[in-house]
Image: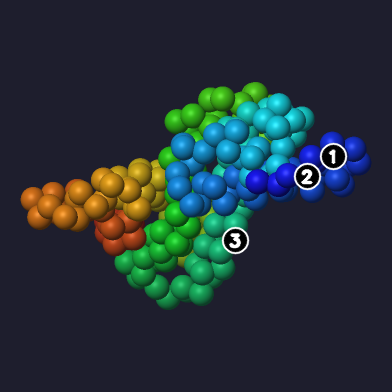
Amino acid sequence: MSTTRPQRARSTEAKRQREREILDAARSLGTAGSVREVTLTDIAAAVGMHKSAMLRYFETREQIFLTLTGEGWQEWSAALRARLGELTAAGHEEIAAAVARSLAARPFFCDLLAQAPLNLERNVSLDSAYAFKTVALAEVASIAAALRGLLGIGEEAAVDVIATATGLAGALWQMAAPGTGLRELYESHPEMAHAVVDVEPRLTRILTALLDGLRA
């Protein structure tokens, strides 16, 4: 924690820089543990600010993490579309694996995908929720266009694939409980082997079945 009392950002550029510092701190804390366990006080301490001063930049802790979720959508979408562009002659399993791998490689984003509809979207202003949804839906449309061209499916089916992939990625990541006592419990008791979730292979299998079903 910084011992220097931070000065209030007065210029537009200084305000953006301070917002970026807050977002980066929240990302680091959420990546190290769990998003749901990170408090506004934790973030404030990480940037050397009083909690009340944080409210000049973000209305709630949920707005901080919802902003990061929007950034996560943009980063994941760009990476996935680039990968899909390389799979011009791929089968369903290879495409499903590419989608699953791209999500499993982003554990913080998977955590956010689970938290967003449960509490992040519900604890911000309607303007903030609208801004986030605008970003997310734009990326859904971009990924859907890539999937339509690759798979020859309709727009609704492509959106269903994305919804299934992101919804399950968030849920499976929570079920996997990486780095927690629950995970250690599952792995140390043979009778609980069914509770050990490996996100990427399971998501790959489910998405492959979905794509096969859409073709049928």
- Crowding at dot 1, Cα within 10 Å, few <14 / some 14-19 / many 20+, comes out as few
Across and down, in percent, residue 58 comes to: 70, 32
Q: Secondary structure at mark 3?
A: helix
**Residue bearing the label numbered 2:** 4
Of 72 and 158, the residue lying toward us: 72
- Seen in the image, is 150 located left or right of residue 194? right
Q: Secondary structure at mark 1?
A: loop
Of tags 2 and 1, the one toward the viewer is 2
Q: Amino acid at mark 2?
A: Thr
Tell me the quarter of the picture where residue 126 sits.
top right
Q: Is residue 26 above or below residue 81?
A: above
Residue reaching furthest to the right = 11
- Seen in the image, is 76 located left or right of residue 176? right
Residue at point 40% right, 73% down?
90
Of 35 and 214, the residue lying toward us: 35
**Residue bearing the label numbered 1:** 7
Residue reaching furthest to the front = 3
Tag 3 near tag 1, CB within 8 Å:
no
Q: Secondary structure at mark 2?
A: loop
